[in-house]
Image: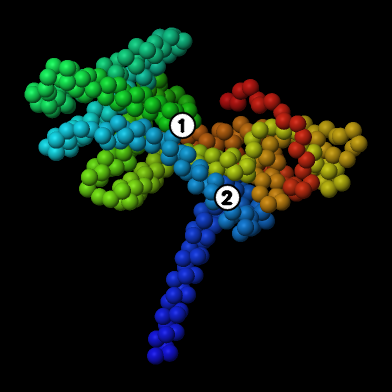
Amino acid sequence: MDIEINKNFLKKVRTWVLSLLTPALISTFIAAFFIWAHLARIGQTGLFFDSVSFSSLFSYLMVFACISVLLFCVVFFTPSFLAGIFIYNDKGDEKNRETLMENNIKVILFTSLLSVLILFGYFFYAHRAGQDGSQHVYIQLSIIYLASILFSLYFNGRITRDKVNAMKWRKKASTVILMHLLKPALFALTACIYIFPLELFLRTLEFPEGTSELRQMLTVIALSIFLIIFSLMPGVAFLRLRDRSSLLRQITVTGGIMAGVLLVIFVFVHMVPALILTLFLRTSGIMDLSPHVYGVPTASYPAAYFRDPAWQETRSTDENYYLLQAVKLYSLGDIRLICPTNIIKSYKDSLKYQIFDTDFDDNVRGKLQDSVTQCRRVKGQELLTLEKLPEPKKIN
């Protein structure tokens, strides 16, 4: 009997301990992984154990890690969830409701894909014609809206006819306007909003030297189509589950699909993890690429420590401080890794990528690590942050 009581007691203690430790362990692991990933990218993993403590990981870093992932998901999946909101309240009898929902998903998909062809196709056409300054945005948006109306009529015309047969003319007119003018306007808006998440991927996309403009255009369009199709998946899944499962299951399944989509995108676009990592580093304050003048005590560090001309080093009037033009690439605990301002270009270049070219990724990351060899480790309590310098006008 005593053995059975002890077993039950141990089970309760084990359950209590696991419920207490599991969130802490998960939080610590995620925060530690983000820190280690940054140090690995810049080739400074030796700083990890010198600067990281359990308290620093478990307190605010986990929060910023989650916020960074969440912000990226909000930007990337916003059009998908807007589509879900615009479609969610579709009215109709049970017979046509599911059909109307599926048709509207098709309208959004085809309108979004066509908008890519219109916007990017016109951009490349204007570029080749030497008319970069005149994009005629309103004409392009009007074409996208017209296309959305035509898709709506094609997919939902029969449903609208059946629905308005027995209605009076005023009700009939309002139903047609809602179905084939107002809703297509919302769908066209969703298609145009895709430009913002796509810009995250396209602004750092690079092409090998000698790549023709036609091939560049086809690559941009193909990548955009790929991203649109995958980013629509969570919203579509949420819509299809709305009447078939609980809200908790809808959120769980949708969240799982979002995670799966991100993993697939990580495989094809290697820049995305680095982009999320950069967002984490900047929001948490671990990295600050804004140029400042920093003061370092001359008594603690030899002059040869900052002999590279890139530091643009001068002395304070009392000769007690080196005055350095630098940025903070890493700041955690009492460790500060400060670098000359030329590291900004190397870091931004490391966020560039080429499709299916891992050698390019290794090359830009290698250049970043080479640049980091100019950086110097100083103690946080000894580093003085003085005036902020203006941002470089242009970094190629």
Instruction: Identify the amino acid type marked 1.
Output: Leu
* Image-based side of 130 in relation to 161, left or right: right
Q: Position of residue 188 (x, y in %)?
A: 31, 23
Residue nearest the viewer, comparing 166 with 185: 166
Instruction: Identify the amino acid type marked 2.
Output: Leu
Name the image quarter holding the C terminus.
top right
Q: Position of residue 206 (x, y in %)?
A: 47, 29
For image coordinates 56% across by 54% down, the residue present is: 32
Q: Is residue 111 above or below residue 234?
A: above
Mark 2 Cα-neighbour bin, 10 Å: few <14, some 14–19, many ≥20: many
Residue nearest the viewer, comparing 342 with 109: 109
* Image-based side of 334 in relation to 54, left or right: right
For image coordinates 61% across by 31% down, the residue present is: 345
Q: Which mark is residue 200?
A: 1
Q: Is residue 258 visible?
A: yes
Residue at the extreme bottom of the image, as rendered:
1
For image coordinates 68% across by 36% down, the residue present is: 327
Q: Is there a contact, CB below 8 Å, between mark 2 and mark 1?
A: no
Q: Quadrant of residue 308?
A: top right
Q: Which residue is identified by label 2?
A: 61
